[in-house]
Amino acid sequence: QYRLGWDYPLHLGVTEAGEGEDGRMKSAIGIGTLLADGLGDTVRVSLTEDPEFEYEPCNRLAEIAQSRLAINPESKARQDAVKPYTDTRDITSYSRRQGELPEQQEGDIVDV
């Protein structure tokens, strides 16, 4: 991606990991192993619970990963080699995307 000039964050997440300890363990294993290797820019823990319960395990995973960078020189070097992602989008302005529907040709099947 860097050779092509693309600068996108690497998102890590486990979709609908479950609920309770089971969901937290699946997220910790799936996301934590990649974070421990110094990979990932954004994290999302998706539990089968109310969204407000997703913050704590997600934040804890990020804290653990950050603390590991201090003791794992390989992970720190890998993370330092990647320039930090900076979101330059203006989220205060909104514009509707423009597009055109394809023209229907005679004999085309219409999916209703």
Image (cartoon, rainbow, N blue to C red):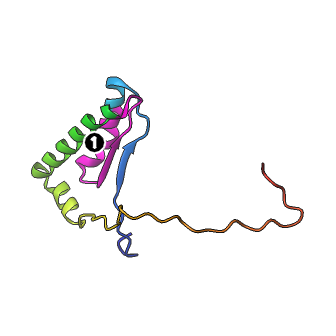
Res 13 → quadrant: top left
Q: In what element is the residue under mark 1?
A: helix
Residue at the location (17% across, 61% down)?
77
Q: Looking at the image, is 35 positioned above or below residue 26?
A: below
Q: Give the amino acid type for the residue marked by disc 1 in the picture.
A: Gly
Q: Residue furthest left?
A: 70
Count of picture labels: 1
In percent of width and height, residue 82 lies at: 25, 65
Task: Give the class, few, some or many, for how many residues have Cα within 10 Å of label 1's Cα (few <14, many ≥20).
Answer: many
Q: Position of residue 35 (x, y in %)?
A: 26, 48
Front residue (pair 57, 27): 57
Residue at x 69% of width, y 65% of height = 101
Give the extent of the magenta segment: 26-51
Residue 5: image x %, image y %?
A: 37, 75
Image-based side of 4 in relation to 62, left or right: right
Q: Quadrant of residue 89?
A: bottom left
Residue 10: x, y in percent?
35, 57
Camera-side residue of 50 and 98? 98
Q: Which residue is mark 1?
A: 32
